[in-house]
Every structure is written in C-alpha cells, then in structure tokens.
Image (tube, rainbow, N blue to C red):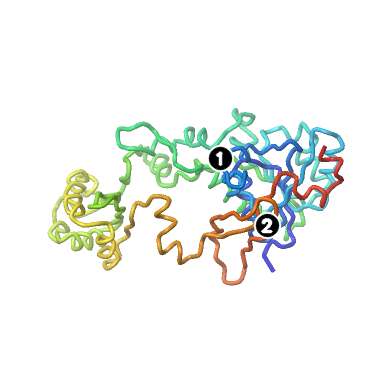
Amino acid sequence: MQPLENIQVLDLSRVYAAPAGSMILADLGAEVIRIEHPNGSDSMREWGPFIHDQSTYYLCANRNKKSITINLKSEEGREQFKKLVKDADVLLENFKTGDMARMGLGYEELKKINPRLIHCAVTGFGQTGPLAYEPGFDPVIQAMSGLMDVTGSLGGEPTKVGVPIADILTSHYVVMGVLAALRMRDQTNEGQFIDLSLLDVQMSSLANVASAYVNTEFISERLGNRHNNVAPYQAFHCADGLLMICAGTDAQFHKLCTVLGHEEWASDERFLTNSLRKQHESVLVEMVTDITMTKTRDEWIKLLQQFKIPGGRVNTIAEALEQPQFIARDMVGEIEHPQYGKVKFIKNPLQFSSLNVQYKLAPPVLGEHTEQFQKPSLAK
C-alpha cells in the first residue's frame, strides 16, 4: 500500500516545474494521467540528449505516469475531459493565466462538476498582478527574482544557477500544496484552487538574502564561492582541486585552526568572531589557502572529518554520481519501457520506514494509454 494509492491526478502540465511535482505524487502512489494534445504539447520531448530516441530531459520528470491525448480545443475533447474531471481528485496545469477559463474549463466551471476537485495552477507570475498574463520560464524567473544578482564570481556578471532551480523548487510546492489541500478536503469535503507562481516561489526561497534586505537593507553581493555573512565558508584550492570548507561557528573555526596547524589563529584579534573574520576575510582566505595547497582534497577531508568540520570535494557530475556515499544510498534506479527499453533515473530522495516509494511505470510515450481512458476517435 502507498499513501496516495486512491488519488487520481489529471496532469495537463508540460516542461518541468509542474510535471516534476506530479511525478513525486506518482512516486507516492497517485495515478497520474498526463493529458496532451494529439500532436504533442510538451516541448521537453524535443530537448536532448536522447536515449532510445527519448529525451533524457523529458524522462527525468515523467516516470510513473500514464499518457492520453485529448484535443481540448474541440467540443468533443472538452466533454471527454469533463468526464475525467468528475472522478478526479487533482487537476494540475500550467497554462497561461486565463487559458483554462477561455476554454470553459476554469476552476469555477470545473468545481460545478466536481466540488471536491483540487485545481493547482502553476504560472510564471500567478493569477493576479500586472504580469499575470505573461509567460515566465525558469531563466526569466532567476533573473527577475534577484537570484542571478547574488550568483556568480566577485566582479563578474550575474549568473543563473546550473539547473532550473525555480522550476525545481516550484515542483516541491506543487506537492506540498496538493497534500495540504487533500488534508483540508478530508476535513471539509471540499476542494479548492491553488495559485502557484514561479516568481513567488523563487522570491520566498531567497532566504537570508531577502531577510537581510527587508529588515536591514543589507545588500548581498556576488562573491563566487564565498558567503555573504560567514567566514571562512567557501571553496579552497588544494593540491588536486577545490575543497569546500564551512566553518560556520567560532568553535568550528578554532578546530579548523588546529587542523591547519595554526592554533594561534584562533586567538588572533582579527579572527576572534565571525564579524571580525568577515572584515579580514581576504587576509584569512590567503592564509588558509597557503596551507590547503600543501595537501590533496582527500587528505584534508580525513582531517576535517576527524574534527567534525563540514567539508567536501567540489565534484564534477561524474564524480558526484560515483562517490561512495551516493552509491551506498542506492539512489540510481532502472526501469524498462515496453517500446524503448531500459532507462536509468535518480530515485526519489524520500526514504520512509513504511510509506514505500515505488517505480512502476517508465515515462510514457505520447498517448500511450489513450485507449484505456477514452474513445480512440478523440485522439484524432
């Protein structure tokens, strides 16, 4: 048994933010039915690299789902969709604001069919505000949220994060929002509408950077691998590459001084507190680097672990996937599709004692399960 075993999700979404959220719901047992136009509506299917002619980008967000095709622009297709809505628990979509209503499929109409329906709408900017009707992709959100302004090297240009972080974070809020709405429905027997904006999510995820500004007007800067508020808290050069060291407390800094063979640094008036260490950070970093360059990363890691100081190699993707800790957690799975064969994937990180996560279905090809849910004529 799985926790969402009796929950059905109609997924009209595409690209990453919303589909990745419905994938997590599917991992937890929900029946997720992807609904696309007969000609396809998810551009991720076209993004390489490919394996067995399937997009690895598409594969990373669509396991454990079924796929059907419906033409929502036709009256027949809309009627078929409404029949599915009648028995569904959740509707997830990321159409531009107003598109569902223009098709006669807005929440106010759908809840007449199914008052218990939870409708989650994911958009770039939300259902209200001057940009409500504008499209917003992850890089645009990273730019507008200020995230790029605090990402990148000192003196360099603003830089986006190497993965679609706004989409990824939003997918998690999809899950949290749906689970909370399902719990509320248990108590009220009523569904609701969830308005989820990528910009809202990314702004709320600025954490200490936003808190520092709204409370003190402190402006965080691009500092490369350094931290705006803590030192030493960055990547240091070693004999064979970069090593991230995070001495976040005075106690950890004292231990680091011992590891580096310079206990006297702990009593140096320039480094007595974190605030003082930030003031003299450039000098401190140069002093630490002179020492870290004398050993390899693995040699330093053994010493850091001995003194319980947070630290780790700055790995390539290949090194990260091959590191013993990741392998020990058994985080790479393999699943087979009847048409295109075996594909590998990174497993869901949730590890329960009894609420089991399962991987039953490989990401579906377009319309793979149409006949299971509707008349073949509607897929034309």
Q: Nearer the viewer, residue 52 or 325?
A: 52
What element does badge 1 sit on?
loop
Image quarter hosting the N terminus: bottom right
Q: Which residue is mark 2?
A: 361
What residue type is disc 2 on?
Leu
Q: Nearer the viewer, residue 367 or 288?
A: 367
Horizontal side of 173 relative to 253 (left or right) equals: right
Residue at x-position 24% and y-position 58%: 253
Residue 17 visible in the picture: no
Residue at x-position 64% and y-position 54%: 341
Of pointers 1 and 2, the one earlier in the residue sequence: 1
Per the model, the C-alpha gap separating discs 1 and 2 is 21 Å
Q: What is the x, y in percent for residue 31?
A: 72, 56
Q: Residues within 10 Å of mark 1 (few under 14, many from 20)?
A: few
Image quarter hosting the C terminus: top right
Residue 354 sits in quarter: bottom right
Horizontal side of 247 relative to 8 (left or right) equals: left
Residue 30 visible in the picture: yes
Mark number, residue 48: 1
Q: What is the x, y in percent for residue 337?
A: 67, 55
What residue type is disc 1 on?
Gly
Horizontal side of 224 relative to 46 (left or right) equals: left
